Each structure stands twice: as structure tokens, then as C-alpha cells.
């Protein structure tokens, strides 16, 4: 069995990776910030602890699903954001080089500015507009600088077993006839199940580097909400509002890229993995209750 050190195991993607790799050639050592059931405590910001565990486990690969993902909250929590999203991956990169492990790290579409209406590929210029985007971009740079063999996979609008937009919409539909959702931010809703399949595909290969990994097709948050209600059989209406209108209602919300659609160009160029279309993935998530 090939050992995998998984971080952020209790998050959406961490849970999906456990399902995806169950019964395969991989044996997962689950970790997260707090110890829970079969999850061991590992704070990725603690370099000596990361190094100690890596030297003891000598894993085939590290899959880093740990992150600080609350986009608005981290505007007032910048140090923590850099620690978890930049220093954490740096530590895993240093330990991976030291112990000969591959490193599979996850990043985000929010590394882009989003001021154009064409999908971004891996060779396009970054320009984050939020603390989350800036710290995740720095995480990527540290991985490139300190790891020998790495995959960085940028994903977007992720939903699975955890707190996410889909669950928020379904919760709101219980008490609201109408919800206001922004219609001028475009992206690629991606199920953690689809992403986990892509990571499983990359893991045994030597096809290292930077990849975009999102479900195919794009939509606005308002389109996404409408599809969720349609598939879940909800009568709730979606009021299309602009980001400016949303910000007036939620002054604490930080800037987000308007058009952060990603093109999975590197996966197309260098491999034969194809993501599901976002409409098929959300249908499967809601109908089959897959995570
Ligand atoms: N969610 C999205 O829409 C989205 C979009 C684009 C990219 N991504 C990226 O996709 C990856 C997976 O996201 P996700 O949605 O699965 O995230 P998630 O559900 O928020 O899970 C992240 C996990 O990491 C844990 N964690 C936080 N700080 C840690 C630390 N210092 N050491 C170890 N674990 C720590 C969290 O614990 P606590 O919950 O206790 O903090 C949580 O269990 C991340 O790299 C994220 O940046 C996500």
C-alpha cells in the first residue's frame, strides 16, 4: 500500500478524497487541525510537527486539503490567512522535499483578478483582489520554490460534505420564497467528488506542475442557485442582483473576481482526464446524494 498523508481530512475535499481512495492501492493517514475519531491532529503551520510526522510516516505523497476558506473573515485575520494558506503549504513542501514525497496542493480561481470575460488557463497572469486570493497565491509560490515533485491544482466554487453555497441555498429555501443572488460573477461550480477523481488520476503520474481543475461549463451564482432549486424541486425564486447591490446589503463582504472561469488547459494538453459538466455534477450531488 502507498501511504498518503492527507491534511484537512475533515473538510469537504478531505472527505471526498477518503471516499475516492477507499479500496485502492493507497492507505490514508488522516489529519486535521483538531483530533476527531480516526483523524489525527496536525497543524500544518507547525513546521517541526510536520517534519516529525513526515519523517515517521515516509508517505508516498502528501495531499493538502487544509486551508482557511472563509473568504470574508480573513480580511480581518490576515496573519492567520498567511499562516494557513501560505506558510502551511511551505512547510509541507519543505518536508516533502526532505522525505522524497510527492506533494499535491490545492489552490483557487481567486488568484485571478477576474476583469475579463474569457476563461483563464495556467499560463495567464494572476492578480488576486482579496486576502484569500493573495495568501493562496503565495502558497503556490512556496510549493514551487520548496517542493521537488508537486502538483498544484486550482479549483473553484467547491461543494461537497461541508459548508457550501448549495447547502446555504437549500437552507434559505426552507424559510424564503425569494433569495437575492449575484448575477455578475461567473465561475465553475465544482463538486468535491469530481475534483477528488481528478486528484486520484494525477497522483500516480509524473505529470507535475500547475493545473486548473474545475467542472466543465460556467455560470453565474444566480444561475447556479436556480439550477439547485430546480433540481431539488424547490419553488424558491432567485432575484438576480449585481455585486454592487449585494455589497450594499452585506458591507462586510470582500472583493471577488467577477469572471474567474478556469480553463483546464494543462489537463487537456498533457492528459486524458475530463471533468463532468457542472450541471451533471450538481444533479448527481442532489439526486444521488453523493459527496
Ligand atoms: N470551498 C471552495 O469553494 C473552494 C474554492 C476554490 C478552492 N478551494 C480550495 O480547495 C481546498 C479544499 O477546500 P474545502 O472546501 O474542502 O475546505 P474546508 O472544507 O474549509 O476544509 C479545510 C479543512 O482544513 C482545516 N484546517 C484549517 N486550518 C488548518 C491547519 N492549520 N492545519 C490543518 N488543518 C487545518 C479546516 O479545519 P477548520 O474547519 O476547523 O478550520 C478544515 O477541516 C482548499 O485548498 C481551498 O482553498 C476551495
Image (spheres, rainbow, N blue to C red):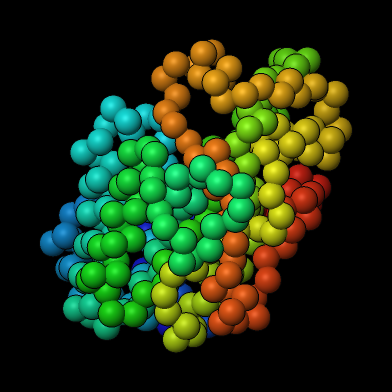
In which quadrant of the rendered view does residue 90 lie?
bottom left
Front residue of 154/185: it is 185
- Residue at the far front: name it: 116
The reply to whether residue 40 is in sight is no
- Residue at the far left: name it: 48
Residue 160 locus on image (x, y percent): 60, 48
Residue 53 locus on image (x, y percent): 23, 68
Q: Quadrant of the N terminus?
A: bottom left
Label count reads: 0
Q: Is residue 151 left or right of residue 249?
A: left
- Residue at (65, 80) in percent of width and height: 272
Front residue of 227/138: it is 138
Front residue of 62/135: it is 135
Question: 222 above or below 153?
Answer: above
Residue 246 locus on image (x, y percent): 56, 20
- Residue at (44, 69) in percent of width and height: 210
Amino acid at each position: 500500500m502507498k501511504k498518503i498523508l492527507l491534511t484537512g481530512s475533515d473538510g469537504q475535499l478531505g472527505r471526498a478524497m477518503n471516499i475516492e481512495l477507499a479500496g485502492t492501492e493507497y492507505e490514508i493517514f488522516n489529519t486535521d487541525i483538531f483530533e476527531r475519531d480516526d483523524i489525527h491532529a496536525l497543524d500544518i503551520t507547525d513546521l517541526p510537527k510536520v517534519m516529525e510526522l513526515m519523517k515517521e510516516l515516509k508517505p508516498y505523497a502528501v495531499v493538502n486539503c487544509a486551508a482557511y476558506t472563509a473568504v470574508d473573515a480573513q480580511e480581518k485575520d490576515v496573519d492567520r490567512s498567511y499562516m494557513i494558506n501560505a506558510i502551511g503549504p511551505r512547510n509541507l513542501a519543505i518536508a516533502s522535499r526532505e522525505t522524497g514525497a510527492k506533494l499535491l496542493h490545492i489552490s483557487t480561481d481567486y488568484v485571478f483578478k477576474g476583469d475579463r470575460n474569457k476563461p483563464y488557463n495556467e499560463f495567464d497572469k494572476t492578480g488576486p483582489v482579496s486576502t484569500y486570493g493573495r495568501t493562496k497565491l503565495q502558497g503556490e509560490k512556496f510549493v514551487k520554490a520548496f517542493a521537488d515533485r508537486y502538483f498544484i491544482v486550482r479549483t473553484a466554487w467547491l461543494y461537497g460534505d461541508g459548508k457550501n453555497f448549495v447547502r446555504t441555498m437549500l437552507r434559505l429555501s426552507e424559510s424564503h420564497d425569494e433569495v437575492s443572488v449575484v448575477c455578475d460573477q461567473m465561475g465553475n461550480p465544482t463538486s468535491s467528488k469530481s475534483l477528488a477523481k481528478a486528484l486520484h488520476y494525477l497522483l500516480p503520474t509524473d505529470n507535475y506542475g500547475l493545473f486548473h481543475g474545475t467542472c466543465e461549463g460556467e455560470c453565474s451564482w444566480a444561475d447556479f442557485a436556480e439550477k439547485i432549486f430546480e433540481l431539488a424541486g424547490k419553488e424558491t425564486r432567485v432575484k438576480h442582483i449585481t455585486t454592487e447591490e449585494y455589497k450594499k446589503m452585506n458591507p462586510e463582504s470582500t472583493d471577488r473576481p467577477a469572471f474567474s472561469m478556469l480553463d483546464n488547459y494543462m489537463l487537456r494538453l498533457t492528459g486524458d482526464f475530463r471533468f463532468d459538466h457542472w450541471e451533471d455534477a450538481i444533479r448527481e450531488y442532489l439526486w444521488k446524494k453523493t459527496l
